[in-house]
Amino acid sequence: MHLLLRTLLTLFISRRRPKLSIWGESSLPLRVLPTDIDIAMHVNNGMYFSLMDLGRFDLMIRSGTWTMMRRKGWSPVANGETISFRKSLTLGQRYTIETRIVEFDERAIYFEQRMVSGGEIYAKAVIATRLVSKDGPVSNEDIFAALGQPPAALVLPEWIHEWRLNNSLPSTRRPAPHVWVR
């Protein structure tokens, strides 16, 4: 809810920005607002992921993917996220969210996103996402039929594969009891 107006504004503005390929790179210029910061006067660590949603929306809208997904009844959902911080973004600072798809596997579409200011990376994240429909997850075959084949140069880095294996939770069709393992 905290980013609802900003999301709607991004959806509106991105439709008027230059078109690009879903396999290209999006660069969304923003400024740190008072609602983005915490008591330490920098962007709150959890807010980075919410702001990165805007970068993925920008890429999907400018490539026409968002319209196609809505027409097919597909919705994107985050499936896993990891982030590293280098510097703090502070109140009023201008920055861009750089977004690109880095690879697919049988369970996810992987986005790399960076918060960049003054030509320097402040934070970098990898977000594993899925497309779902009322019938469940959308297959890669259906995604590629709608979007075209991804470039051959996309290769899932081994560390991302290991991260997904080590951090994934069981399928929603299997139990996931809450038990601390020591």
Image (tube, rainbow, N blue to C red):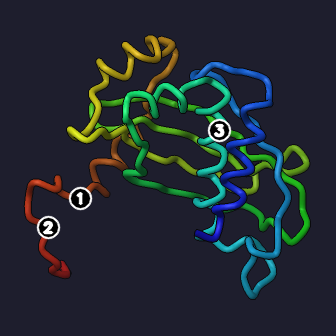
Instruction: Estimate the x, y position of residue 33 in percent, counting from the top left.
Output: 82, 68
Taking the spot 31% from the left edge, 20% from the top edge, the residue there is 142
Instruction: Estimate the x, y position of residue 91 in percent, counting from the top left.
Output: 87, 72
* Residue 6 tag number: none
Q: Secondary structure at mark 1?
A: loop
Mark 2 to mark 1: distance in Å?
8 Å
- The residue lying furthest to the bottom in this view is 39
Whichever of callouts 2 and 3 sits on the residue coming sooner in the sequence is 3
* Residue 169 tag number: 1
Instruction: Estimate the x, y position of residue 73 in percent, counting from the top left.
Output: 37, 35
Q: Is residue 156 left or right of residue 132?
A: right
Q: Secondary structure at mark 3?
A: strand
* Residue position marked by numbered label 3 in the rendering: 99
Viewport quadrant of the N terminus = bottom right
Whichever of callouts 2 and 1 sits on the residue coming sooner in the sequence is 1
Q: Amino acid at mark 3?
A: Thr
* Circle 1 crowding by C-alpha within 10 Å: few under 14, some 14–19, many from 20: few
- The residue lying furthest to the left in this view is 174
Taking the spot 78% from the left edge, 40% from the top edge, the residue there is 13
Q: Is residue 57 left or right of residue 132?
A: right
* Residue position marked by numbered label 2 in the rendering: 176
Residue 134 visible in the picture: yes
Q: Amino acid at mark 1?
A: Leu
Q: Is residue 133 left or right of residue 20?
A: left
Instruction: Estimate the x, y position of residue 92 in percent, counting from the top left.
Output: 91, 67
Taking the spot 27% from the left edge, 48% from the top edge, the residue there is 165
Mark 2 to mark 3: distance in Å?
32 Å
Tell which of 143 and 109 is nearer to you: 143
